[in-house]
Image: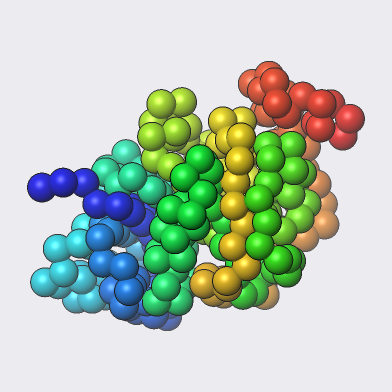
């Protein structure tokens, strides 16, 4: 069997209220050439049972179960390790996507064959409206830092071969801004990227959870992320980060 066009990784931990809408939205994609790895990070509610019932009979969906709770970075890494698709996307277990989520990414890649990253618009957290745009590497990094692109993993379609060639993973030692760190690492290998303003991703704003990361926790995590990037000595990041 040939590899699918897209692999989608869904980390899920205690998503009793939300996993149904998340997985159902993926089952309703207009583009059907994809696989999904749902990573149950040792949920203590009925998330695992819901996943099994929702995906029964749909061989595009696969479950990876962690024996103990390891965090979202480890869950994403487990899904990435199993993925076989040309393109790689992430959807959080409490979010959902529009039916053309994957099709929009594919259309952008096909219209700009030399691009190495496609970013979509989204509803919810820190949405910064912008028209369609092609970013060079420097502008991409600036917009991951603060801007339209953002440091999220879920509004992007990555090329999986770039990830595997350069052994990119989510850092399992941090639990905040881990997706922004991954985005910066990936950007080191991107010369051109496309922003598509179509809002195809729904980020579910959970007030108490997100509020806990505002203020001192944010700046503490940001300093830690900057230190990691500088230690890795990514050439393309040096000019922007050494001044912060």
Q: How does the figure colour the protein chain or chains?
A: rainbow
Q: Residue 154 location in percent, x, y?
A: 52, 58
Residue 214 occupies quadrant = bottom right
**As drawn, is 195 to the left or to the right of 23?**
right
Residue 93 visible in rendering: no
Q: Residue at x 39, y 76 (%)?
A: 99
Residue 198 visible in rendering: yes
Q: Is residue 232 above or below residue 176?
A: above
Q: How many numbered marks appear?
A: 0
Q: Nearer the viewer, residue 34 or 114?
A: 114
**As drawn, is 127 to the left or to the right of 75?**
right
Q: Residue at x 43, y 53 (%)?
A: 110
**As drawn, is 15 to the left or to the right of 132?**
left
Q: Residue at x 21, y 46 (%)?
A: 3
Q: Is residue 11 above or below residue 188?
A: below
**As drawn, is 203 to the left or to the right of 38?**
right
Q: Nearer the viewer, residue 68 or 229?
A: 229
């Amino acid at each position: 069997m040939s590899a699918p066009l897209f692999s989608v990784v869904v980390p899920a931990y205690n998503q009793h209220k939300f996993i149904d809408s998340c997985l159902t939205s993926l089952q309703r994609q207009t583009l059907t050439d994809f696989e999904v790895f749902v990573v149950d990070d040792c949920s203590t509610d009925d998330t695992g049972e819901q996943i099994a019932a929702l995906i029964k009979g749909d061989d595009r969906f696969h479950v990876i179960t962690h024996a103990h709770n390891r965090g979202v970075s480890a869950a994403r890494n487990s899904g990435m390790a199993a993925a076989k698709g040309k393109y790689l996307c992430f959807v959080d277990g409490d979010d959902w996507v529009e039916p053309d989520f994957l099709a929009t990414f594919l259309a952008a890649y096909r219209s700009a064959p030399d691009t190495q990253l496609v970013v979509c618009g989204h509803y919810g957290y820190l949405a910064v409206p912008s028209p369609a745009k092609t970013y060079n590497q420097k502008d991409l990094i600036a917009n991951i830092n603060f801007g339209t692109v953002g440091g999220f993993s879920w509004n992007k379609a990555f090329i999986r071969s770039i990830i595997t060639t350069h052994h990119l993973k989510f850092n399992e030692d941090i639990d905040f801004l881990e997706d922004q760190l991954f985005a910066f690492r990936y950007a080191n290998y991107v010369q051109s990227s496309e922003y598509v303003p179509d809002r195809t991703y729904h980020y579910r704003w959970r007030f108490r959870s997100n509020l806990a990361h505002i203020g001192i926790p944010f700046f503490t995590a940001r300093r830690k992320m900057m230190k990691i990037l500088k230690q890795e000595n990514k050439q393309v990041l040096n000019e922007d980060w050494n001044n912060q």
